[in-house]
Amino acid sequence: MVTIFEQKVYDLCRLVPKGKVTTYREISNALRGRGQIYRAVGNALNKNPFAPQVPCHRVINSNGFVGGFVYGTKSKIALLKKEGIEIKNKKIDLKKFLFRF
DNA sequence: ACCATGACGCACA
DNA sequence: ATGTGCGCCATGG
């Protein structure tokens, strides 16, 4: 089941350009303008009915850690690296690759 | 309608 | 700076 909320989340994920990443915090912030729904955001992505279709791998934690991934954190990191994102010790430089809406 | 869970974030010690 | 605990929203059973 795809709720409006999830749809919004997926849409935002799609907006993230290649080579950039976003955080749950940013998404939640861009979504409602507040920031307290990152839990729900993570949930929506976790369900991810569009798996590889939606570039949900570009969504990371606000602290810069990749976080989790259905196909495994490794795959997520690999994908991000493919996009030209530098990853250090499972972490990403938000300062450089963080995309803001 | 209620309880429990989750790919998180932040405050506090 | 590091570690622990609590809280938030939405969804599923």
Image (cartoon, coloured by chain):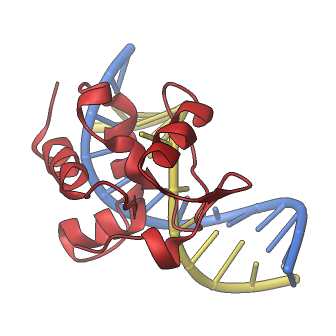
Chain colours: A red, B yellow, C blue
- The quarter of the rendered structure image containing the C terminus of chain A is bottom left
Tell me what residue is drawn at x 37 percent, y 62 percent: A20
Is A75 or A69 nearer to us in this picture?
A75
Tell me what residue is drawn at x 25 percent, y 37 percent: A54
Tell me what residue is drawn at x 22 percent, y 50 percent: A9
Q: Which quadrant would residue A87 be assigned to in this image?
A: bottom right
- The quarter of the rendered structure image containing the N terminus of chain A is top left
Tell how many labels. Answer: 0
For residue B4, above or below residue A66: above
Residue A28 located left or right of residue C2 = left
Residue B11 located left or right of residue A11 = right
Residue A96 horizontal/vertical position (percent) = 48, 75
For residue A80, above or below residue A100: above
Tell me what residue is drawn at x 34 percent, y 29 percent: A47
Residue B9 located left or right of residue A91 = left
Residue A4 horizontal/vertical position (percent) = 10, 44
Is A57 or B8 nearer to us in this picture?
A57
Residue A66 horizontal/vertical position (percent) = 57, 51
Q: Which quadrant would residue A74 be assigned to in this image?
A: top right
For this orientation, the residue located farthest to the left is A4
